[in-house]
Amino acid sequence: MTLPVPISLLDRSRTRAGEPSETALRDTVERAGRAEQLGFHRFWVAEHHAVPGIASGSPPLLMAAIAARTQRIRVGSGGVMLPNHRPIVVAEQARLLTALHPGRVDLGVGRSLGFTAPVRDALGVHEYSPERFAEDLTALADFLDDTGPVTAMPKGAPSPSLFVLATGSGLATAAERGLPVVVGGPVLWGDLAPLQGYRDRFVPSPACPEPYVVVSADVMIADTSARARELALPEAWAMVESRTTGAFPPLRPQPAMTLTDRQQAKIEEHLARSVHGTSDKVFEDLTALTRRTGADEIMAWISTHDREAQGGSEAALAAMAPVS
């Protein structure tokens, strides 16, 4: 069983109840090393601020630690949120990484704001329009191409591969600038017209001569479908708890609250948008998803409270990857 496209991993440095947050960060670095040994194409980390369930707020720092502990795998951000940073700062951080690890650094950028109002207060950003994102993305690309108003240091360092974490407006912005995109959620499971619009409007660029779509999906593999569903539940419980309390929590082996019928329905919705089951079932579902979306790559998000089971799921998924 071999999927027709490369497979990569996204890691959000998920915390677990009863453990210090630094454990999650060490796990992320160690997980990247295993991902390289298993043959995954990329290993990406995310940016979240003041979220109890996620330890990483600084993708560049975590990418530096990962790149220093690995040799081959591409290391990237999924993503750096441009509302929180000036484009020149993002450019210089990425160029520093590429200077130290040439040919291995990806810079995925997005425009999500802080998770709650207090977090947005702390970041000093409450509004961020699609137009502002387009302006910042252009400025970032100019700094990376050495065409900005000042030079992003270190001068002469190779540029990272730039990706856009995109929804509707982000897809249009990426198409106009000839950039690859990472899509998930409603873009995958609903109307595919925005994705087709990206391809139709795509303007080739030197770095990306053709449209390139990375599909991000929640994945869980186990020996039985029932076990895979069980392993997918901690993330579903966390999602429901975040909507109830306003705080995205650490992973737990059991739900933190007695679930109402409405909350249980939300869990079922979450599970319906994940790809979980036996290896054969997940292979069939990912193959179908790749064909339906025309994906050029799969970015898998595998997360559960049981670390051993999580590792087993990763190994099963890696076995489906094409030989690079």
Image (cartoon, helix red, strand yellow):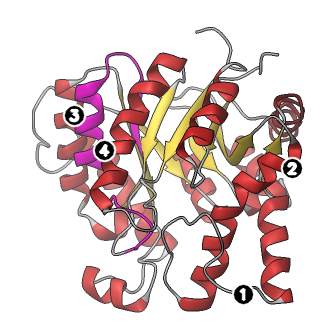
Q: SS of the residue at dot 1?
A: loop
Task: Compare marks 2 and 4 and give the one earlier in the sequence.
Answer: 4
Residue 238 x/y as whole percent: 60, 72
Disc 3 vs disc 1: which is toward the camera? 1
Kind of residue indicated by mark 3: Leu
Residue ID for mark 1:
258
At mark 2, the secondary structure is helix
Q: Which residue is mark 4?
A: 26
Residue toward you, 203 or 324 = 324
Decide: marks 3, 4 in contact (CB < 8 A)? Answer: no
Query: Which mark is in front, 3 or 4?
Result: 4
Place of residue 113 in the rendered image (x, y in percent of width and height, measured from the top left) = 43, 75
Q: Which residue is mark 3?
A: 97
- Secondary structure under badge 3? helix
Farthest residue to the top: give it.
323
How many numbered marks, from 0 up? 4
